[in-house]
Amino acid sequence: MTAETLLNQLHKVRQNGTGKWMACCPAHEDRTPSLSIKEDSDGTILLHCFAGCSAEEIIGAAGVEMGDLFPDTDRHSFYDGPNQTPHRESRGEADLATRQVRHLTAEAMINAGHRLTADEKKQAADDYYYLKSVDKIP
């Protein structure tokens, strides 16, 4: 989903700069815009309600899912596709960076209340133990 798609579902939208908007928050009775929306360069959509609504409340009221706020390439998967197995082999620095991104993504998804699939749990554990073994996690 793009920010434009989300913005079309909101009221009193006004642009605050490149990739930044304010709108009325759909999670509470909002007469003046209190919801900040930002689209990062990678396509991730960030939300902040100055009245204190959580991201979960905002997306629920807007009729979207947490995964919709992230680019399609990162969406609900840590591996190449539904019929492929998670990556298991080290490929140097590129593999390290990939593992770090997957680890942080899994951590964010878990903290946001999402349940990982069995394959994602395996991949997250594999990434965690690999990163711990190379001293990239305390």
Image: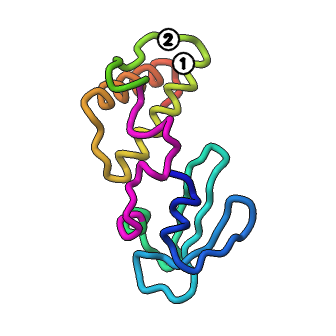
Q: Residue furthest left?
A: 118
The residue that appears at 37% across and 64% down in the rendered structure is 63
Residue 124 belongs to the span the image colors magenta: no
Q: Can you tell which quarter of the image residue 89 is in? A: top left
Q: Position of residue 67 (x, y in %)?
A: 41, 48
Tag count: 2
Tell me the kind of residue under disc 2. Ser
Pointer 1 with pointer 2, Cβ within 8 A: yes
- Front residue of 117 and 23: 23
| Vertical side of 83 occupied by 58: above or below | below
Q: Position of residue 38 (x, y in %)?
A: 62, 60
Instruction: Give residue 90's mark.
Output: 2
Range of magenta residues: 59-79
Q: Residues within 10 Å of mark 2 (few under 14, many from 20)?
A: few
The residue that appears at 58% across and 80% down in the rendered structure is 12
Answer left or right for 111 relative to 136.
Answer: left
Tell me the kind of residue under disc 1. Asp
Residue 77 belongs to the span the image colors magenta: yes
The residue that appears at 43% across and 23% down in the rendered structure is 80
Instruction: Give residue 95's mark.
Output: 1
Answer left or right for 117 relative to 96.
Answer: left
| Vertical side of 10 occupied by 71: above or below | above
Q: Residues within 10 Å of mark 1 (few under 14, many from 20)?
A: some
- Front residue of 69 and 1: 1
Answer left or right for 134 relative to 15.
Answer: left
Q: How far is disc 1 from disc 2 in space, using C-alphas?
A: 6 Å
- Front residue of 105 and 71: 71
Q: Position of residue 111 (x, y in %)?
A: 37, 50
Answer left or right for 44 relative to 21.
Answer: left
